[in-house]
Image (cartoon, rainbow, N blue to C red):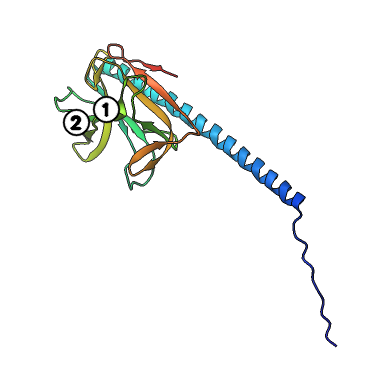
């Protein structure tokens, strides 16, 4: 005798599906909030660190009585990581051609927090460092090289590069690197710094 046992599978009810959707939506909202707070925290940390680096660079130029360069090195396309770096370098005098600079490294490269980068575009009508032409920086007798954006401070603590009479600004925010360019994301926002000429102290614009 063959016995055929019928198994009836009970599907999800409409109420159960709605409950699941509400739970998933709540988890997604929580995740976005956590990500946003993390991005904001990273941006603030990066801005504070770079502000301190500007102060350190101008102070070093005064105490050393030589021009000091604060070099910003965006991530290299195809490089081992996607982290923005900045570092201090010293020169005996600023060359006439800012496209090529031979310098001595004052301190090791500093790393921006993961996902925090510098972005181009005018800021309240001010020139943006990332809109200037980059320089080819070499140190260790030419054994080490990097393409960088340069803030150079003279021995009086004033801003020498980029050249001109107007202040220079930088924009720091969270984003991703696509085709060698930083693309800003909306979750973390950005901060802007204004760097004057005669007294090159950084001032927050937001």
Q: Nearer the viewer, residue 160 or 59?
A: 160
Please provide percent x and percent y for residue 161.
Answer: 24, 22
Instruction: Report whether 36 appears left or right of 204.
Output: right
Please provide percent x and percent y for residue 101.
Answer: 19, 31
What residue is at 75 percent from the left and 56 percent from the top? 12
Q: Nearer the viewer, residue 60 or 187?
A: 187
Q: Residue furthest right?
A: 1
**Number of numbered labels in the structure image:** 2
Quadrant, the N terminus: bottom right
Alpha carbon distance from label 2 to label 1:
10 Å
Q: Which residue lies furthest to the left in this view?
A: 96
What residue is at 83 percent from the left and 85 percent from the top? 2
Q: In which quarter of the image is residue 142?
A: top left
Please provide percent x and percent y for residue 120.
Answer: 34, 30
Is residue 55 visible in the rendered image? The answer is: no
Q: Where 48 falls versus 183 (above or below)? A: above
Residue of label 2? 101
Is residue 21 visible in the rendered image? The answer is: yes
What residue is at 36 percent from the left and 31 percent from the top? 119
How many residues crowd around disc 1 within 10 Å: few (fewer than 14), some, or many (20 or more)? many
Chain-order first, disc 2 or disc 1: 2
Q: Quadrant of residue 180?
A: top left
Query: Under tag 1, what secondary structure?
Result: strand
Numbered mark located on residue 150 in the image: 1
């Amino acid at each position: 005798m063959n016995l055929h046992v019928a198994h009836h599978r009970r599907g999800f009810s409409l109420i159960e599906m709605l409950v699941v959707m509400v739970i998933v939506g709540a988890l997604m909202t929580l995740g976005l909030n956590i990500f946003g707070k993390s991005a904001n925290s990273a941006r603030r940390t990066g801005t504070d660190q770079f502000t301190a680096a500007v102060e350190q660079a101008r102070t070093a130029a005064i105490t050393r009585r030589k021009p000091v360069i604060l070099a910003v090195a965006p991530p290299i396309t195809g490089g081992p990581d996607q982290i923005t770096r900045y570092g201090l370098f010293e020169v005996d005098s600023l060359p006439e051609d800012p496209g090529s600079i031979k310098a001595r490294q004052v301190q090791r490269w500093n790393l921006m927090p993961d996902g925090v980068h510098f972005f181009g575009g005018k800021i309240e009508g001010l020139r943006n460092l990332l809109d200037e032409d980059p320089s080819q920086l070499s140190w260790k007798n030419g054994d080490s090289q990097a393409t960088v954006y340069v803030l150079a401070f003279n021995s009086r603590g004033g801003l020498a590069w980029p050249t001109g009479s107007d202040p220079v600004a930088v924009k720091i925010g969270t984003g991703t690197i696509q085709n060698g360019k930083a693309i800003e994301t909306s979750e973390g926002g950005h901060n802007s710094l204004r760097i004057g000429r005669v007294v090159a102290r950084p001032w927050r614009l937001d």
